[in-house]
Image: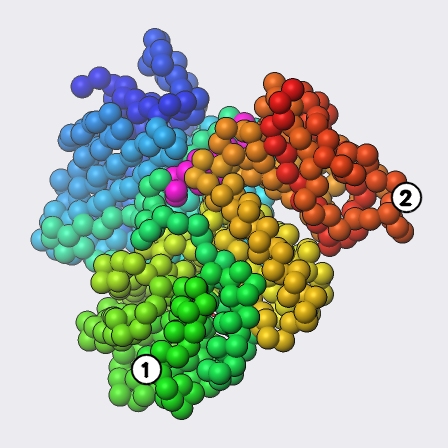
Amino acid sequence: MSNLLTLSGNRTNLIFRTDSGMPELVHWGKQIKDLTGIEAMLDKPVPQAGLDQMIPLTLAAESGRGLFCAAGIQGHRQGLDWSPIFTIVDVLESEQAIEFVCEDARAGLKLNIEVSVDPKTEIYTWQAHVTNTKSEGYQLDHLAITLPIAGHLDQLRSFGGRWCQEFREHSSLLEHGAIRIESRHGRTSHQKSPFWFVGDRTVNNNQGEVFGFHLAWSGNHSLNFEVTSDGRHLLQIGELLFPGEITLEQGETYSTPKLYAGYSPSGMNQVSQSFHQHIRHNILKWPVEKPRPVILNTWEGIYFDHDPEYIMQMARKSAELGVERFVLDDGWFEGRDNEYTALGDWYLDKKKYPNGLEPLIDTVKDAGMEFGIWLEPEMINPDSNLYRKHPDWVMKVEGYEPPLGRYQHVLNLQIPEAFDYIFERIDELLTRYDIDYVKWDMNRQLVQAAHQNKPGFSGQNYAFYRLIEKVRNAHPSVEIESCASGGGRVDMGVMEYTHRFWTSDCNDALERVSIQNGFSYFFPPEVMGAHIGADEAHTTQRKHKTMFRALVALFGHMGLELDPVKSTEQELSEIKEFVALHKTLRPLIHDTSSRFYRLDITTDDCLVGWMIQSGDKQDCVIAFFQTAMPRFAVPTRVTLPQLDSSQNYQVEVLLKEQEIGYAMKHEPEWMQQPETVSGDWLTTQGLQLPIMYPETGLLLRLSSAKS
Ligand code: DGJ
């Protein structure tokens, strides 16, 4: 066996050495084709006062070798077999994948490490599997592949915030020890999103060397970014397990969630585009490929106040606005009059809907719209018939009472009867009614979540995947939205079964700019639920004009989160125009060959720019948002290096909130009528922006003009 193995995409590759008996990743990045002399170059000096040989940093980072970092595999067998050292016993190679089959027979463990590359997207997929080969049970505490990271890449960018403030960006420098980020919320979480960038200190959207990582998992997770005292940087990302959570009996295997990774020598936009393409080509499974229908969701319009006559009025009004899918949110099922009751009782509330759901569904369909419905299958309220019948279906450790979250407990889907009951309820609902779409919600974090008194976090997440998959298989034409109090379950694990995310419960356009900006690093616009909310945002009480609210919602999968019956005629006519505009731009915004760019505007951190460009670079839309008072009296130019410098572009203002007035005496000439400008200028010097009031936006279209 040669000591060097490579796995190549189109522009990047991985090089492994195996002479220590275990795989070590010695290169990942710009493709190196000529391996001449590499082995000699890999030889490292051995310092005094340490171990007498250089210890290889293998993909398993075994502590038993003499590595003083976190071990890639942690576990034991009643205190034994706690320090395995693996050896490769086989390597399975194909053009786009390598699998290392490794074993420590003495410790009774087999470890398989797989990596594959998709040359279309340049995304690498990593996964490890550990199998217990001995008769006594093996208690696994942690498993993560160890990826060495070049020393100059010491900046970690992580994402997370809280309810109504998802995907906030955080930067940390790794100088000493380790940076550890853990999510113990039992779901993907608002707090710690499983997406990260590791890059050099110059990284922004268009420059700098950077890797992006995403753990495709909707449960607990951890990241360890560590530097050893001999200067080696390493990254370990995996599922976070609670004590006793995984015991492998003989022959049993534990597999890590898939870790997706992308690389760019020139900034984060390129990595984002790789992830967007990966989702589009390898993860999303549309029942039918069609334009993403504009949605009206009833939640903020009526909350629990369900009157079918009124809702039918909302539906008719929605259709007049151009809405294409009408979604009935929480409050439709038996006894669900408020947040305290009825989760688990998935039967139509006959008091609210004495004539059934059919009249509403017929109204929606007659108006030419699809019909969607809200569900929260994984939950149970103590005040519900289900709980009164099956209090033992709650996830908890006997003898303890877990705290309620939104007045609800978690239903243990690992109990077969509970799983079957929930599936039967959903199946009956989707069979009986003509439902096109499910908003699948999940509104609490998991605490002491046990199955048979042992930690049941991982098992619950797998049971959830099984349930949603079974629903998908039984009703393949139904699309599903992943929601968890907004963006608490946004990840590529759940994306295998779903088609859209409810990005945030915050419909305040100003907050949405940063939330959606964070979301865009990993997910493409067509899966980002973005709704025009009421003029006064419910979660912040901030007020914004329709144009700003619409402009922010335009670059996603657009919808409305308001009551059209109560809106003024003026607001309705504005919304109608924006819905129509979205539909005009939708083919460009959602096209699988289009590219999304975050624009770097370093002279004003309160100015955010997004650009979507067609695959052939002939057409693009650009939105700018001034989120607070501009830093300077006159904004600088924004260069657009993404354009084709050899073309001319017609630059046209589609929407503007700026006008001659208190802030601006003269508007740049190009804004007054469509102007043809050379790509050479735009890519080098760029656009002179107008003076924008805080909390306003600007929408431009640039299309290739014949020179
Ligand atoms: C939380 C969701 O994020 C909201 O959009 C709404 O569906 C409520 N749950 C309903 O309870």
Residue at image position (53%, 50%) is 583
Which disc number belongs to residue 36?
A: none
Could you say which is closer to the camera, residue 178 or residue 506?
506
| Position of residue 393 measured from the top left corner of the image (x, y, whole percent) | 27, 78
| Position of residue 269 measured from the top left corner of the image (x, y, whole percent) | 53, 35
| Residue under pointer 2 | 665
Secondary structure beneath label 2: loop
- Residue 540's quadrant in the figure? bottom right
- State whether residue 688 is above or below residue 307: above
| Residue under pointer 1 | 347
The magenta stretch spans which residues? 266-280
Q: Is residue 51 magenta?
A: no
| Position of residue 23 measured from the top left corner of the image (x, y, whole percent) | 27, 29
- State whether residue 341 is above or below residue 18: below
Residue at image position (38%, 39%) is 278
Residue at image position (68%, 69%) is 569
Nearer the viewer's eye, disc 1 or disc 2? 2
Is ligand 1 less than 8 Å from the beta carbon at label 1?
Answer: no
In the current view of this chain or complex, which residue is farthest to the top? 36
The disc, 1 or 2, on the residue closer to the chain's N-terminal end is: 1
User: Which amino acid, by three-letter code, is at mark 1?
Assistant: Tyr
- State whether residue 313 is above or below residue 260: below
Q: Quadrant of the C terminus?
A: top right
Q: Residues within 10 Å of mark 2 (few under 14, many from 20)?
A: few
Could you say which is closer to the camera, residue 346 or residue 131?
346
Could you say which is closer to the camera, residue 255 or residue 467?
467
Q: CA distance from mark 1 to mark 2?
A: 61 Å
User: Which amino acid, by three-letter code, is at mark 2?
Assistant: Lys
| Position of residue 359 measured from the top left corner of the image (x, y, whole percent) | 39, 79
Q: Is residue 643 left or right of residue 125?
A: right
